[in-house]
Amino acid sequence: MDVARRIIRKTMLKQVSEIVACSRYSSKPPNTTNNEAPAIQQRSTSVPHEGHKERIPRIGDDGFAVTLMGAVKPKDDQIFHAMGSCYELCSFIGLAREHAHENGHSYVEYLKRIQTILIDISVAISNCSYNAPNTHNSTQVLPMVSPSPLSIKGTTFSKRHVSELEEWIEEFSEALPPVEHFVIPGGGLVSAELHVALSVCRRTERKVLPLVRDGNLDGEVLAYLNRLADFLFVISRVASQADGAIESVYTPKSSPSTPNTSNVSSS
């Protein structure tokens, strides 16, 4: 995953540098009274060379970013919302993975495998040909730069990834008691972190859905995220069990006619 992340970062920096070298979009709102494209502002991004200090590219200062296909889009474009949510999910899984590793849990490598798949999903999203509606100027066309080598991966996604998750769900479910009540997030630190990841996974589904629905992204991505949420729920219960924590479940409030009892019980 670290290698893939470095490749993506290096590629994006190289692509956007091509734009920076030529021109920058002005941070001022575009003129909406005519059909002219936004004004282009020349700005130097050079930094004095001092030993081995890392160069600060100042990419994206004007609110634009570049997809792997070479399309320059606003940072609030639907593609970047989906990519950002996907990376947030990857990060929360990474946090849970670190703590699971410290506690000697058996499924750590499964989480790392999922993180690599989420990077692949981010690449597929960035390769989308989706064109966001222009809210400022109906004739404005944003520039293109040379596509990244990663763009050849396209937007397809293998069905075997979903099957893999299903196998894992069956494997880990065998050692768990059946769920008879709504499980309240908690049951140990790792379990709680996996519940957070599960919530972000559901949000990522919602961000990806429009891209799939419009035919810009393989539907298998949506299926994977749906199954991933199921897996994260199962593995959160495994984590709670591994840490010897008490799994809390929701119990409906008693009616006024019955004695008052706690809202939370343990199983």
Image (cartoon, rainbow, N blue to C red):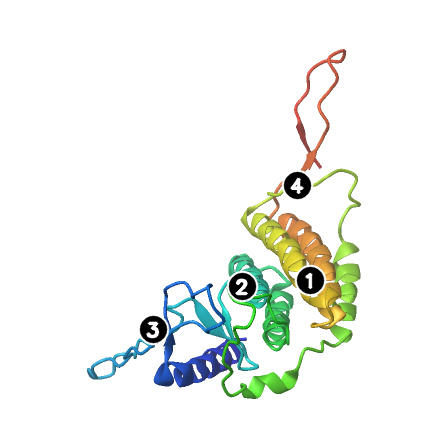
Cα distance between the residues tagged 4 and 2: 31 Å
Q: Secondary structure at mark 4?
A: loop
- Name the mark nearer the viewer: 2 or 3: 3
Task: Indicate which disc, 2 or 3, sits on the residue closer to the N terminus.
Answer: 3
Q: Which residue is mark 3?
A: 58
Image point 64% across, 76% down: which residue?
129
Which mark, by number, is residue 210?
A: 1
Tell me the residue that label 4 is attached to: 247
Q: Amino acid at mark 2?
A: Gly
Q: Which residue is mark 2?
A: 84
Q: How much space separates mark 4 and mark 3, taking CA atoms? A: 47 Å
Q: Which kind of residue does numbered mark 4 sit on?
A: Glu
Label 2 close to label 3 by CB (< 8 Å): no
Give the vertical position of 198 relative to 45 (above or below).
above
Alpha carbons under labels 1 and 2: distance apart: 15 Å
Q: Tell me which residue sits at (59%, 67%) in the image.
A: 132
Between discs 3 and 1, the one toward the N terminus: 3
Q: Is residue 216 above or below residue 172?
A: below
Image quadrant occupied by the N terminus:
bottom right
Question: Horizontally, is 140 left or right of 245 in the view?
Answer: left
Residue 263 sits above or below residue 148 on the image: above
Query: Residue 246 occupies which quadrant of the picture?
Result: top right
